[in-house]
Image (spheres, helix red, strand yellow):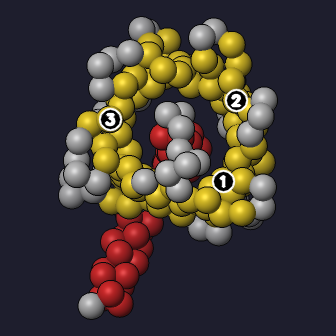
Amino acid sequence: MELMVLIKGNNKYTVEDKKSRLLYSIKKKGFNNSKLNLLDASNYNLYTLMTTGEMSYTIVLNDDTFMLINCKSKFLDPTIDCEGKQLKYILKSKNSRDFSIIINDEEKGMIKTNVSVSGELQYDITIEDKIFDDYIPLFAVVIDKIFGDANRQPQVIQQIVEEKREEKHDKE
């Protein structure tokens, strides 16, 4: 499965499939900046992402804690642990932009930071269909919250664009 998480303003994101169909939106809940709701295309609230610390978050389902998310390392070996009652994901990166989605020591997907046509960051998610669940796009939001400011620096954006050009050139 391939998805794109696009930034649409302050604390607002949309999630589209590869045919640009809107699947989800992620919006601030009321005036509270620490809560974001993941809504399906019918605007039904699926999950809530709550900020619980500088680099820690909680995904809430039906007013119960569903998953705890903690950034273990921001600089040397960027790693985010996402631990639920039955599943544990590790998001691991070498450059703070491209994160492997790891379950049981196996890579099951990827979240890549790219630059959209408008110059804003976007997050491309590729994940095995059988592993996908509705809350997965919230992982990209967490990456944006923790690493987004650093990745928005002009020199980093230029580097992302150049890497994308090289990938395109290598495919040809």
Q: Is residue 132 visible?
A: yes
Left or right: 18 with respect to 110?
left
Amino acid type indicated by mark 1? Leu
Name the residue that disc number 2 marks.
67
Q: Secondary structure at mark 1?
A: strand
Which mark is in front, 3 or 2? 3
Residue 91, disc: 1
Point out residue 168 in the picture as x, y percentages from the top left corner.
30, 82
Q: Residue at x 70, y 47 (%)?
A: 89
Contact (Cβ within 8 Å) of mark 2 with mark 1: no
Q: Nearer the viewer, mark 1 or mark 3?
A: 3
With 31 as the anchor, is 164 left or right in this view? left
The residue wearing badge 3 is 23
Where disc 3 sits, the SS reads strand
Q: Is residue 12 visible?
A: no
Image point (35%, 29%), residue name: 25
How far is mark 2 from mark 1, CA to CA? 14 Å
